[in-house]
Image (cartoon, helix red, strand yellow):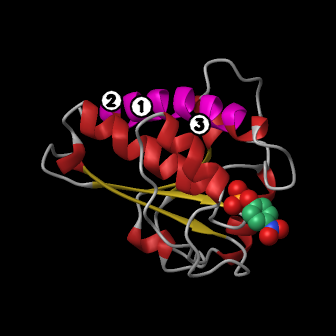
Amino acid sequence: MSNSHVTRVLFVCLGNICRSPLAEGVFRELIREEAVDHRYQVDSAGTGAWHVGEPADRRSRAVAEKHGIALEGRARQVSDEDFRDFDVIIAMDRENQGNLERIRNGGSARLHLLREFDPEAEDDAEVPDPYYGGPGGFDEVYDIVHRSCVELLEALEADRR
Ligand code: 4NP
């Protein structure tokens, strides 16, 4: 892969209001800190349509803010076009991954589970859905997402070399 190539990364969960906006925000912060943001295009989406157009859940925004990250996107639903428009699609859990495989209609995006990159996770580990839980669930999701995104960025940078 040439060094001028932009790597397009899409994070996907169910609603696109809790987990994937947080993953998008954390990844954006990491590429900015590492001064490689010009090499990446980053977005997030949900497999479901219930929350399309909404900002991120206030609990996700609160945990992101604690870490100096502003979540500014609006929810959108993933589409089969995303498999052509992105190089890498990162699902938060196996249900998201299964739904993505079902809607896929060609495209060359590579599909992964985020926790494949979590140095502390067992095989097939998932980012738990925090929507119906308390705020502590969002801190846990932040920690999982942060340590996984650090390794994801390392893997994507290694792919570029
Ligand atoms: P997310 O969380 O997939 O991390 O955005 C959820 C948001 C909304 C719903 C479920 C999970 N919901 O059922 O509306």
Label 2 with label 1: CB-CB less than 8 Å: yes
> Which is more foreground, mark 3 or mark 2?
3
- Binning the other alpha carbons within 10 Å of mark 2 as few (below 14), some (14 to 19) or many (20 upward) gives few
Separation (CA) of disc 3 from disc 2 = 20 Å
Residue 69, by quadrant, is top left
Q: Name the residue beneath numbered marker 1.
A: 155
Of the pair 102 and 27, the residue shown nearer to us:
27
Whether the residue carrying mark 3 lies under 8 Å from ligand 1 is answered with no
Q: In the shown orientation, is residue 104 left or right of residue 146?
A: right
Of the pair 37 and 142, the residue shown nearer to us:
142
- Magenta stretch: give its range: 139-158
The disc placed on residue 158 is 2
* Secondary element at tag 3: helix
Q: Is residue 106 above or below residue 130?
A: below
Q: Amino acid at mark 2?
A: Ala
> Which is more foreground, mark 1 or mark 3?
3
Separation (CA) of disc 1 from disc 3 = 15 Å
Separation (CA) of disc 2 from disc 1 = 5 Å
Spot occupied by residue 156 in the image (x, y as percentages of width and height): 37, 37
Q: Amino acid at mark 3?
A: Val
Q: Is residue 46 above or below residue 59?
A: below
The disc placed on residue 145 is 3
Residue at horizontal 81 percent and vertical 58 percent from the top: 95
Q: Main secondary structure of the magenta part?
A: helix
